[in-house]
């Protein structure tokens, strides 16, 4: 019984290390998003850190339009990054879980 427990604890420690490595790797995964008209382009990491924002020159004359496009485009980019991050971390966590009947449905 203790052998199984110690094995499970070792597996959990290994999984935790893999999760941390995955989080670091996600800092290097860059995602691009742009507004429907292409006037705003955003690049961020899968960990939702904004790396760059590019704006069309004409937007500098219309503050309200610029703000609206930034909000919409950033929200789309964050949603995309969150999806990538959750899928990657879920895969690592699922891989490290012991085989307990019924638990596999939690990671779908």
Image (cartoon, grey):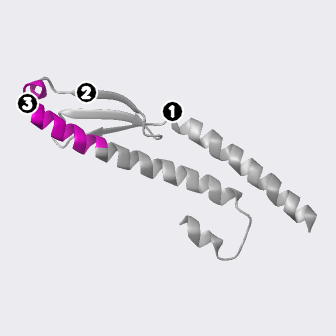
Decide: few, some or many residues near mark 1? Use Cα within 10 Å; few <14, some 14-19, many ≥20.
Answer: few
Q: Residue 1's image quarter?
A: bottom right
Q: Which residue is mark 2?
A: 54
Residue depicted at x 23% and y 45%: 72
Distance between the alpha carbons at the discs numbered 3 and 1: 34 Å
Residue indicated by mark 1: 28
The residue identified by callout 3 is 62
Judge left or right: residue 60 versus residue 16: left
Mark pair 1, 2: CA separation: 19 Å
Pointer 3 local density, CA inside 10 Å: few below 14, some 14–19, many at least 20? few
**Element at label 2:** strand
Ranked by sequence position, the earlier of labels 2 and 3 is 2
Side (left or right) of 70 relative to 28: left
What span is colored magenta in the figure? 58-74
Residue in the image at 7% along x and 25% along y: 61
Please tell me whether mark 2 or mark 3 is closer to you in this view.
3
Task: Assign a secondary structure to mark 1.
Answer: loop
**Residue at screen point 43% across, 52% down:** 83
Left or right of residue 7, residue 56 in this image = left
> Is residue 20 part of the magenta span, yes or no?
no
Asked if the magenta segment contains residue 67, the reply would be yes
Residue situated in front as seen by the camera: 88 or 82: 82
Is residue 1 rendered to the left or right of residue 58?
right
């Amino acid at each position: 019984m203790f052998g199984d427990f110690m094995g499970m604890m070792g597996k959990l420690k290994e999984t935790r290390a893999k999760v941390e490595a995955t989080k670091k790797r996600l800092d290097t995964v860059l995602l691009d998003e742009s507004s429907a008209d292409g006037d705003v382009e955003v690049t961020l990491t899968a960990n939702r850190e904004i790396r760059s924002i590019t704006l069309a020159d004409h937007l500098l004359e219309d503050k309200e339009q610029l703000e609206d496009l930034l909000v919409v485009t950033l929200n789309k980019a964050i949603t995309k990054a969150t999806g990538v991050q959750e899928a990657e971390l879920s895969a690592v966590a699922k891989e490290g879980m012991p085989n307990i009947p019924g638990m596999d449905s939690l990671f779908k």
